[in-house]
Amino acid sequence: MKVAEAVGRALSASGVGHVFGVVGSGNFHLTNAMVAAGSRFVAARHEGGAATMADAYARMSGTVAALSVHQGPGLTNALTGVAEAAKSRTPLLVLAAEVTEPRSNFYVDQEALARAVGAVPVRVTSAEGAVGEACTAVRRALHERRTVLLNLPLRVQELDVPDDAWTWSAPPPKRMAVEPAAADVAALSQVLERARRPVFVAGRGSRAPGGRDALEAVAERYGALLATSAVARGLFHGNPWSLDVSGGFSSPLTTELIGAADTIVGWGCALNMWTMRHGRLIGADTTVVQVDDDASALGAHRDVHLGVTGDVELTARRVLETGGGKRQGGQGYRTADIAAAIAARVRWRDVPYEDTSSRERIDPRTLTIALDDILPAERVIGVDSGNFMGYPSMYLSVPDENGLCFTQAFQSIGLGLATAIGAALAQPDRLPVAALGDGGAMMGAAELDTVRRLGLPMVVVVYNDDAYGAEVHHFGPGGYPLETVEFPPTDIAAVARGYGFEAVTVRTLADLKAVEDWTAGPRSAPLLIDAKVVRDQGAWWLEEAFRGH
């Protein structure tokens, strides 16, 4: 058996059940070996789309996914998606064929490319060690939560694997939970016992099974309000003390309540500039605690008064086991007045606004509230980047922490459609919704073919303002010329029909009748909504976004 086939079979046996990619000569045999061994291959139309699909699938399935690419340009095409995955610490395995002869037209320093975007480069070096090296790459992706580039030199792929080189240790199916130190648990309990207005902010590290129950129990004991970072949105859906998302997407009430907290605990949350609005959500006298199973993450974005190294669920359970502390009954931040305010005003759709819709263009708030009511509640949403992104991220509800896939660590536009595809495959029982701006929709349009080919009953919503809206609203008030970021009107609905979609152009609420009909029907083809949205103002979160530039 050749190395290419042996590695493919070993990766499948190690639990890599889904591989995304574009197949060329260099990754042909490897990919087919994985398929023969039981992995599912999802063919994308561009390596960039494949990388983001794999990233989203890994995030929403809780498993290691793989990306398979050709040597040289196959990898460079995928780099933006690989960078997003690496910055998000997605357990992703990038399988790249490699040429090692500098005179080859396919040659690039693939190891340097990986390091440049934050991925971990490794290489299959010999026929004798190939299987073990591949399985080690899987183990690193899983247990270190890293995006790992496994380079597979062409000359090594063609070698015969010795009969005695098939022994390896398969990685456990999940990362081992980190036990917090007893002293840290005691210190955290003491902080919570002193708190009068505590707020918990749960991040990516809280999304594991059992995380919600454990955090809700601790919050109930100490009277804490509950919020999440954007990537964990939906974790506390339905809880009457949930503030939804903390940070740039916060509603006015959420901003007010978090800003008045005397204690903020980040549970598996970076407490970065986005989640804490560049620190402005943290009062001068607020005690800040961070719990994370990676010690290097503690205090990485801001100073904390107490850092606890430990798994979120385990740490919360250990706090509960300490006994004592506050009990149920309107204590801490949980008062009747605050409960009433949360019920009435925490959702963005409940915040009054002036509807600026016209006969030609619809207000994105009005559009998104209507879609929230029309589309089934059991949904999984993938969101692109751009001026529009706050509307679907905050006006569309999600049923739980697996309802929103937020690939925004690199802030690239053009990833949203591929994000929704990967999320849809990981959550097949839900309606997939892709929310895109017109710029990102056109950039990633090739993957409309992938949606149709896979038979996904997806709704693609394009917030179409005929421009790169973030730049228009950021630079326009200064009187700068905008010709470089504005475009003639584009019939994106017609583009979608060419890919086999049903499509509707929406200018007013009446046009959404077609969406209602599609939702009620067989959904035999995906639907694209080309929503002509107003261009009169920047989104509320835009100023926050540009503060980070």
Image (cartoon, rainbow, N blue to C red):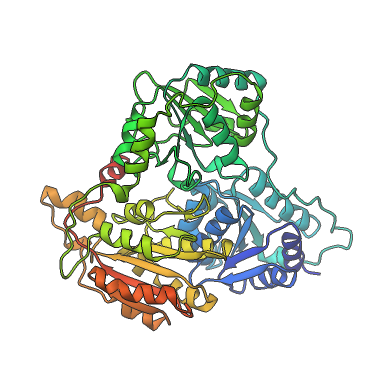
Labels in figure, total: 0
Choose top left, top right, bottom left or bottom right for residue 175.
top right
**As rendered, which of 290 and 414 lies closer to the eye?**
290
User: Is residue 139 visible in the rendered structure shown here?
Assistant: yes
Q: Is residue 319 left or right of residue 258?
A: right
Residue extending farthest left: 479
User: Is residue 279 visible in the rendered structure shown here?
Assistant: no
* Residue 326 placement (x, y as % from top left): 54, 21
542 over 325 or under it: above or below? below
**As rendered, which of 208 and 544 lies closer to the eye?**
208
5 over 176 or under it: above or below? below
Q: Is residue 252 left or right of residue 535?
A: right
* Residue 359 placement (x, y as % from top left): 15, 70
- Residue at position x 62%, y 45% in the image: 209
Q: Is residue 173 left or right of residue 496?
A: right
**As rendered, which of 89 and 461 lies closer to the eye?**
461
* Residue 110 placement (x, y as % from top left): 56, 56
Q: Quadrant of the C terminus?
A: top left
Choose top left, top right, bottom left or bottom right for residue 150.
bottom right
- Residue at position x 29%, y 62% in the image: 367
Residue extending farthest right: 164
455 over 39 or under it: above or below? below
72 over 471 or under it: above or below? below
- Residue at position x 71%, y 58% in the image: 15
* Residue 135 placement (x, y as % from top left): 73, 53
Q: Quadrant of the N terminus?
A: bottom right
